[in-house]
Amino acid sequence: MKGLAMDTSALLWYKTPADDWNKALPLGNGRIGAMVFSQPLEERIQLNEDSVWSGGFRERNNKSALPNLEKVRKLLFEEKINEAEKIIYDAFCGTPVNQRHYMPLGDMNVIHYKESECDFKSRSLDLNTAICTTEYAINGVDYTREMFISQPDQVLVMHITASEKKAINVRVRIDGRDDYFDDNSPVHDNDILFYGGCGSEDGINFAAYIKVLHKGGKVYPYGSFITCEDCDEVTILLGAQTSYRCEDYKGQAVFDVERAEEKTYAQLKADHIADYKSYYDRANISLSDNSSGNSALPTDERLALVKEGDPDNKLIEMYHNFGRYLLIAGSREKTLPTNLQGIWNKDMWPAWGCKFTININTEMNYWCAENCNLSELHMPLIDHIEKLRPNGRKTARDMYGCRGFVCHHNTDLWGDTAPQDLWIPGTQWPMGAAWLCLHIWEHYLYVQDREFLSEKYDTLKEAAEFFLDFLIEDKKGRLVTCPSVSPENTYLTASGSKGSICIGPSMDSQIIYELFTAVAEASKILETDGGFRKKVLEARDRLPAPEIGKYGQIMEWAEDYDEVEPGHRHISQLFALYPA
């Protein structure tokens, strides 16, 4: 790793290239993402842009929900769970079933076209600089590729150097997936315009523009490639834009690259590092090095030793640093929030649609935003709540006859709020907007910005209004949600019935308690809306409190049910412990 300082808590490095997407190294500027494989002879850079989704907005509220709401509630109170779930499956799930899903932009390839063998040295991601470096040798010549994605200049940058003059012979191209693109041909001697669309009549169109700059040698088009022959240095710039943000998305992608081209590589790199470090350097964790020398090993070898029981505090530091890095790389002001996989996705139909899964995943992405002094990076999530509000009002009214706004366990880039999937353990969960709104309150608690709180008070209030209408009395006179689920879990009743749809799961009551508390406190701070404050506090006092079950556990449901799958991966009943 020539030229790299060994920071054992901030340098991910490996002795072999990535042979699998999950082993590639992620780069990002909040909007453009890349997974770097560091294959020396035939490099693949898998590309994403945060607004490349599968189509336009869909109106998906199930009009059959409201006429069947009381029937479902009656069946649940009678513990006729299977009958209730059959109605939920048909009358409450979204129509159509799916929200829009996230998609990859394409792949950039950089190929050494004259060589067939090489000696691979190392690949690394320096968390101090957000730069990925690949080192290898071909026929006694040492090569280095540096790569980063600049937020100030809004471009991906790859810089290739060699230990000898006239040694760089590579071809560069960009390709799409599953025919979801229209062209990837060179435009002039040293540039390619790649563009296409994602589908649906009002879907998203995208463009990526590559320009190849060189010192020494020559550059020329060759088929769908740009060929670099006998060059001393090569710099590749890539810009990407979509119709989601820009009417002239092709022109904007070209503009981004041509503006970046006005800087030298050294200037681009320096500006990128300065911007990145202005966030990354705000927090630090320092633990004693107890690794007995293991901390100098490649990252994958260190992980293997920890799995065997060897201590490595510096690897714990790296884990903390990597989490902060991913938030900085995946969530910047004016971008979309990080989705189920951040901004990194290789699949046209990714797992769970790679949407914003808001029954824990999206919220968890932002758990380090405030306590690691990255408050600005919280704003894409908070901004996205405003997209939910108009759609969520319609969902609340059409499906439940309630005021306020609601969202279920997923949303997409359009702020879709209707139930997602046909999966009973997850779909029918009306708490997504409420949990997201707690991020508004969390942000205020850290930054103490009264103007921000005043601006967002109506959003908090609307989320609470929904539950003032939606909550019903259970047999003990408590106010509970119905119908709902404890996310992704299934229970077993004393009579042997299995179910997921239920009355008053513990997590719901805990989220609503926090929401009502936040609204009441905000009202008090802002010295406004005392009547509404009184209503939410009265309702809060009637919510079920956390209870201890027959095994000494915190009960997950309002009744002391058994889990069908003991030790389930979701521990929703502990929301009151964390994050609340």
Image (spheres, rainbow, N blue to C red):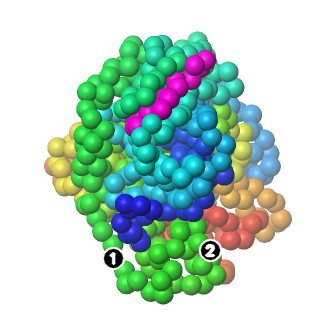
- The residue segment tinted magenta is 222-239
Task: Compare residues 162 and 318 and report the one nearer the observer.
Answer: 162
Task: Compare residues 529 and 255 and report the one nearer the observer.
Answer: 255
Task: Compare residues 574 and 55 and report the one nearer the observer.
Answer: 55
User: Residue 129: where, in percent of width, then height?
Assistant: 34, 54
Q: Which dot, 1 or 2, sits closer to the camera?
A: 2
Q: Is residue 286 left or right of residue 27?
A: left
Q: Residues within 10 Å of mark 1 (few under 14, many from 20)?
A: few
Magenta stretch: includes residue 232 = yes
Residue under pointer 1: 286
Magenta stretch: includes residue 532 = no
Residue 80 in sight from this viewpoint: yes
Q: Which quarter of the picture shows residue 1?
A: bottom left
Q: Is residue 314 left or right of residue 17?
A: left
What's the residue at 40%, 58% (across, down)?
126
What's the residue at 64%, 64% (across, down)?
569
Mark 1 is on which residue type?
Ser
Residue under pointer 2: 304
Q: Secondary structure at mark 2?
A: helix
Q: Is residue 364 left or right of residue 492?
A: left
What's the residue at 57%, 63% (across, down)?
15
Residue 240's disc number: none
Q: Is residue 418 left or right of residue 403?
A: right
User: Residue 515: where, in percent of width, then height?
Assistant: 39, 53
User: Residue 557: where, in percent of width, then height?
Assistant: 62, 64
